[in-house]
């Protein structure tokens, strides 16, 4: 009898965070069936959660943005170290559970839960972003954070391992992409830790990595939309030459021509857009063939969840409609041929990068291209 009493007493008092949940607690948590469409994998290891918050180097005055808080395993630790937390959650069940978890506590007054898609949500100013990132918004989230008018001091983000490695990739490496160039232009990226799949519930199919992204301050004096537009065109065919990327697709030339017309209109530059006559066309130097069959659109081929800017969406839709109707390239106009010649001049004469492949280009090469194009009145946004 005394032995049984000791067992019962020990079981009743065992309430540490590391103890095995009771049957009642397990039943309560089982109501959450993780939504695969939302990429839900809750971080369950308290040691990993504590390490992530520690590596964020939070100040007592910090306002933290947490993306995908789930049931709040990270949130409650962040609240202990920061002044306020804004948590953006897509799943109403998780948002309700998180609110309930801190309800009636001092920390609850410093937590604001926003229900919705973080990519489409207008965010308040914040100092640090911490996220156990749902895999399908990894790239959109990074680009949103980097393009904010007032970027945070740092971002501590957990990603699937391959995506995380793309952030560090260098020219010539297999994972080098538009994402690599963009992130390394606008920020300093460092690796924090590896996180095994068994630290999550349910376990994902792959391992994860936590990275720190620190936006550069001051920011590079480059228009983000211009820089990203240039890279978007270059990396659509990263294993082809830059000549093929810019001169080998009618949709790209149409985009650049349209932008050049806008540039001329804004700067009161007169244009002659009459068609070339037969003699002028015959006298033109031979140019490379336009190969539209291989063109799959402006979306990043390395990122299936890439969100196109509206301008690219519109132009891509128009290009596809023309292709479906069998509309071929109309008779050459003087403006379109002028733009073609400007592009050729930049690639072959001014930068001598025409035969280089984007996957081998360094940041300096892309900066040289952007400057030369802009000097010629060619823009990408």
Image: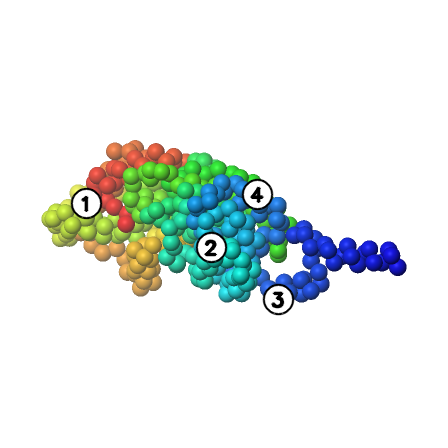
Q: Identify which residue is drawn at 27% across, 51% down.
A: 255
Q: Is residue 267 left or right of residue 113?
A: left
C-alpha span from label 2 to label 1: 59 Å
According to the picture, the residue beneath numbered tag 4 turns out to be 51
Instruction: Say which quarter of the image contains residue 112.
Output: bottom left
Q: Residue at position x 43%, y 49% from top? A: 63
Q: Residue 309 location in percent, x, y?
A: 34, 54
Q: Earlier in the sequence, mark 2 or mark 3?
A: 3
**Disc 1 or disc 3, which is closer to the eye?**
3
Relative vertical location of residue 74 with respect to residue 369 in this rendering, above or below = below
Residue at x 45% of width, y 51% of height: 84
- Marks 2 and 3 sit apart, C-alpha to C-alpha, by 27 Å
- Badge 1 vs badge 3, beta-carbon distance below 8 Å: no
Gap in angstroms between the C-alphas marked 4 and 2: 22 Å
**Pair 1/4: label in front:** 4
Circle 3 SS class: loop
Image quarter (top left, top right, bottom left or bottom right) of the N terminus? bottom right
Return the residue at label 1: 338
Q: CA distance from mark 1 to mark 3?
A: 64 Å
Cβ–Cβ under 8 Å for marks 2 and 3: no
Q: In this image, 285 relative to 95: left or right?
A: left
Q: Nearer the viewer, residue 361 or 188?
A: 188
Choose between 368 and 93: the one closer to the eye: 93
Give the mark toward the camera: 4 or 2: 2
Q: Is residue 206 left or right of residue 316?
A: right
Residue 295 image offset from top left, x and y in percent: 37, 52
Measured in 3D between alpha carbons, the distance from the residue under mark 3 to the one under mark 4, in whole angstroms, is: 28 Å
The residue sitting at the right extreme is 1
Where is residue 185 shown, x and y percent of the image?
37, 39
Q: Badge 1: how crowded within 10 Å, few (<14), some, or many (20+)?
A: some
Label 3 crowd (10 A; few <14 / some 14-19 / many >=20): few
């Amino acid at each position: 009898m005394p032995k049984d009493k000791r067992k019962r007493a020990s079981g009743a008092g065992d309430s540490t965070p590391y103890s095995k949940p009771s049957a009642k607690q397990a039943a309560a948590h089982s109501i959450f069936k993780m939504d695969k469409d939302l990429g839900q994998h809750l971080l369950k290891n308290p040691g990993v959660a504590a390490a992530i918050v520690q590596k964020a180097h939070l100040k007592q005055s910090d306002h933290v943005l947490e993306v995908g808080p789930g049931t709040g395993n990270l949130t409650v630790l962040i609240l202990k170290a920061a002044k306020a937390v804004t948590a953006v959650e897509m799943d109403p069940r998780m948002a309700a559970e998180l609110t309930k978890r801190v309800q009636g506590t001092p920390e609850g007054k410093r937590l604001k839960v926003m229900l919705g898609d973080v990519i489409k949500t207008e965010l308040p100013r914040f100092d640090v972003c911490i996220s156990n990132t749902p895999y399908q918004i990894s790239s959109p989230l990074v680009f949103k954070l980097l393009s904010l008018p007032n970027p945070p001091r740092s971002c501590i983000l957990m990603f699937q391992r391959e995506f995380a490695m793309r952030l560090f990739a260098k020219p010539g490496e297999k994972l080098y992409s538009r994402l690599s160039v963009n992130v390394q232009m606008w920020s300093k990226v460092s690796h924090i830790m590896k996180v095994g799949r068994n630290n999550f519930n349910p376990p994902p199919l792959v391992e994860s990595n936590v990275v720190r992204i620190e936006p550069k301050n001051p920011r590079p004096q480059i228009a983000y939309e211009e820089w990203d537009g240039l890279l978007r065109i270059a990396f659509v065919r990263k294993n082809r030459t830059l000549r093929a990327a810019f001169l080998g697709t009618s949709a790209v030339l149409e985009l650049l021509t349209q932008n050049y017309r806008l540039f001329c209109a804004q700067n009161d530059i007169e244009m002659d857009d009459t068609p070339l006559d037969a003699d002028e066309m015959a006298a033109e130097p031979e140019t490379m063939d336009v190969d539209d069959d291989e063109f799959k659109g402006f979306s990043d081929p390395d990122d299936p969840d890439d969100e196109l800017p509206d301008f690219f969406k519109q132009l891509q839709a128009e290009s596809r409609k023309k292709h479906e109707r069998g509309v071929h390239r109309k008779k050459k106009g003087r403006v379109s041929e002028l733009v073609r010649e400007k592009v050729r001049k930049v690639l072959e004469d001014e930068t001598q990068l025409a035969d280089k492949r984007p996957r081998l280009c360094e940041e300096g090469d892309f900066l040289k291209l952007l400057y030369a194009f802009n000097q010629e009145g060619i823009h990408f946004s």
